[in-house]
Image (cartoon, rainbow, N blue to C red):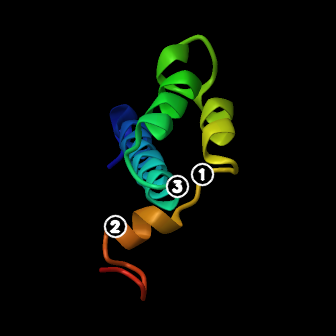
Amino acid sequence: MWAGGYAAGYYAYLWTQMLDNDAYAWFMAHGGLTRANGQRFRDMILSKGHTQDYAPMFKAFYGKDPDIGPMLEDRGLTATAK
């Protein structure tokens, strides 16, 4: 069923969705899409490119390890989902 590397690709796709939801939650918790927040994201993530592993870069930006909570909420799978 999962032959040919599909499982790994699917996992990576879900992982990036989780990081996307976490980053959005961080922005909303810190005042939204402000110039300062955008610059922080640019300085800590975008400008680094493939020079470092993304896990430590994201943790430095987010302030903690990635969290599944914002992704579950986005998908309507929590009691607080909108």
- How much space separates mark 1 and mark 2, taking CA atoms? 15 Å
Residue at the location (46% across, 64% down)? 70
Q: Earlier in the sequence, mark 3 or mark 1?
A: 3
Left/right of residue 55 with respect to residue 2 in the rendered view? right
Q: Earlier in the sequence, mark 3 or mark 2?
A: 3
Q: Residue furthest bottom?
A: 79
User: Residue 51: where, in percent of width, then height?
Assistant: 59, 11
Q: Give the numbered dot on residue 66.
A: 1
Front-most of 64 and 39? 39
**Local SS, label 3:** loop
Amino acid type, label 1: Pro
Few, some or many residues within 10 Å of mark 3 (<14, 14–19, 20+):
few
Instruction: Give the answer, above or below, for where 18 lies relative to 57.
Output: below
Q: Are marks 3 and 1 in contact (CB under 8 Å)?
A: no
Residue tagged by mark 2? Answer: 74
Residue at the location (63% across, 35% down)? 55
Front-most of 25 and 40? 40
Q: Are marks 3 and 2 in contact (CB under 8 Å)?
A: no
Front-most of 26 and 32? 32
Q: Quadrant of the C terminus?
A: bottom left
Amino acid type, label 3: His
User: Residue 39: where, in percent of width, then height?
Assistant: 48, 29
Few, some or many residues within 10 Å of mark 1 (<14, 14–19, 20+):
some
Q: Are marks 1 and 2 in contact (CB under 8 Å)?
A: no
**Local SS, label 1:** loop
Q: Residue furthest top?
A: 51
User: Residue 76: where, in percent of width, then height?
Assistant: 31, 77
Amino acid type, label 2: Asp
Q: Earlier in the sequence, mark 1 or mark 2?
A: 1
Residue tagged by mark 3? Answer: 30
Q: Give the numbered dot on residue 15.
A: none
Residue at the location (46% across, 51% down)? 27
